[in-house]
Amino acid sequence: MKLLPVLFLLISINSFAQSYNEQLAKHRDSYKQDFVKEANSPLKEADLKNLHFYDADSTYKVVADVEILKNEKIFKMPTYDGTSKEFFRFAKIKFILNSKETVMTLYKNVALAGNPAFKNLLFLPFTDETNNKETYGGGRYIDLSSTDILNNRVEIDFNKAYNPYCAYSDGYRCPVPPEENDLLLEIEAGEKLYTGEKKHRK
């Protein structure tokens, strides 16, 4: 009789893993199709075969403590085309990943904050030890919403980390991840290096 609770636990863990894998697969399918739908996209349907991702790994889905920052000044975040975009620091997040306490900063884009459709959008750009090896050298991004923050906590899923458009083509204004979000560990989750030929935008 004592085996039953253990058996149910194993079944529930397996079901969770399967459902998470399915959710992430749907997320990635939608992500790919957005390239085809988006008029400003650097990729076409034929390019999608050159997109690659790490296998789903729920250990890279963490819950972070959030400290909302007050009275932050607007600053210019450099972009890879030599220009910049205006952001402000929205919050500090702290979590444990691979047994290491990690602190990162969430940002808010000033221009998008004034657009009702994007007023809650938060930006989490980062670099890590996989860059220039298995992932794009310019770092990767994660999108969040301020509505995701509940009781000063937020879920960060590095499996949803994606490449900026600059990974596929020149001619885009992709923000350079600030040094404070340079992680001294390998984030083996999310999008990998694009293996197609880099495009040149007219």
Image: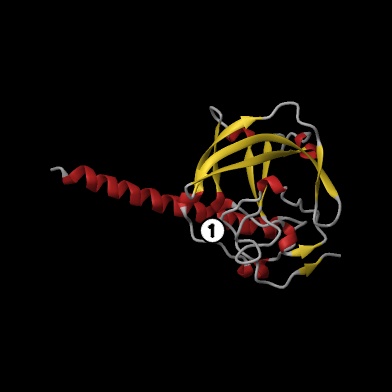
> To which residue does mark 1 refer?
188
> What residue lies at 46% left-to-right and 50% top-to-bottom?
59
Total numbered labels: 1
Q: Quadrant of residue 123?
A: top right
Residue 7 lies left or right of residue 157; in this view the side is left
> What residue lies at 51% left-to-right and 53% top-to-bottom?
24
> What residue lies at 42% left-to-right and 50% top-to-bottom?
19
Closer to the camera in the image, 67 or 169? 67
Q: How is colour applied across the structure in the image?
A: secondary structure
> What residue lies at 76% left-to-right and 50% top-to-bottom?
175
Coordinates of residue 53 in the picture (x, y in percent): 56, 62
Q: Is residue 148 above or below residue 79?
A: above
Q: Secondary structure at mark 1?
A: loop
Coordinates of residue 38 in the picture (x, y in percent): 72, 55
Type of amino acid at the residue the image marks with label 1: Glu
Closer to the camera in the image, 31 or 173? 173
- Quadrant where the N terminus sits is top left
